[in-house]
């Protein structure tokens, strides 16, 4: 039997309300809606963030609290992204800092409580 290999994959976040989570990923990370269903008052949507895709789906009782999941995004400027996050009211848990492996990273929390890490190569 031939094994089928996945072509692509993406995370889907379960959220109580789409608008504040959509606003975070759109305004802070430049996410663009590429699909939503239904068209009017969507219960699910897909965002394109650079080369990545992220799904957001409504859930009456989404999990809350600490998670074993972090989302990592490479951005053009960590410092500018963190300024957008602060303006959007997102908690920044670790300010931009150069790392010994050659990247500058910062950590913040999205409206659902998930850790989001933004990074850029140092010297970019």
Image (cartoon, rainbow, N blue to C red):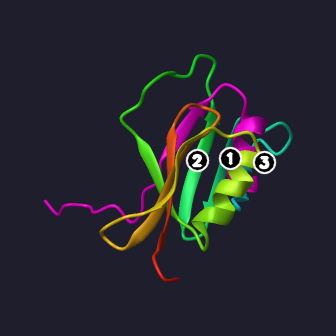
Rendered location of residue 37, percent (x, y): 73, 44
**Residue beneath disc 2:** 55
Residue at x-position 13% and y-position 59%: 1
- 1 and 2 marks in contact (CB < 8 Å): yes
Farthest right residue in view: 40
- Count of all numbered marks drawn on residues in the image: 3
The residue that appears at 53% across and 64% down in the rendered structure is: 52
Can you say whether 113 is above or below 34 in the image? above
User: SS of the residue at dot 3?
Assistant: helix
The mark that comes first in sequence, 2 or 3, is 2
Secondary structure under the numbered disc 1 in the rendered image: strand
Disc 1 crowd, CA 10 A, few/some/many (<14, 14-19, 20+) = many
Residue at 37% x, 64% y is 99
**Is residue 48 inside the magenta stretch?**
no
Q: Is residue 39 something one can see in this rendering?
A: yes
Q: What residue is rendered at 62% in x and 38% in y?
A: 91
Q: Earlier in the sequence, mark 1 or mark 3?
A: 1
Relative image position of residue 98 (x, y in whole percent): 43, 65
Q: Which residue is mark 1?
A: 45
- Disc 1 to disc 2, C-alpha distance: 6 Å
Residue 87, numbered label = 3
* Disc 1 + disc 3, Cβ < 8 Å: no
Q: Quadrant of residue 15?
A: top right
Q: Nearer the viewer, residue 112 or 91?
A: 91
Q: Is residue 8 one of those drawn in magenta? A: yes
Q: Nearer the viewer, residue 66 or 16?
A: 66
**Numbered range of the magenta stretch:** 1-27
Using a 10 Å C-alpha cutoff, classify the residue at mark 3 as few (fewer than 14 neighbours), some (14 to 19) or many (20 or more).
few
Q: Is residue 112 above or below residue 83?
A: above
């Amino acid at each position: 039997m031939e094994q089928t290999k996945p072509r692509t994959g993406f995370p889907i976040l379960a959220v109580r309300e789409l608008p504040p989570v959509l606003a975070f990923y759109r305004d802070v990370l430049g996410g663009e809606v590429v699909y939503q269903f239904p068209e009017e008052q969507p219960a699910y949507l897909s965002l394109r963030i650079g080369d990545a895709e992220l799904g957001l789906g409504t859930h009456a009782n989404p999990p809350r609290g600490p998670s074993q999941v972090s989302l990592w995004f490479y951005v053009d400027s960590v410092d500018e992204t963190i300024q957008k996050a602060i303006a959007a009211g997102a908690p920044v848990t670790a300010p931009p800092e150069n790392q010994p492996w050659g990247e500058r990273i910062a950590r913040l929390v999205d409206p659902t409580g998930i850790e989001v890490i933004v990074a850029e190569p140092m010297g970019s």
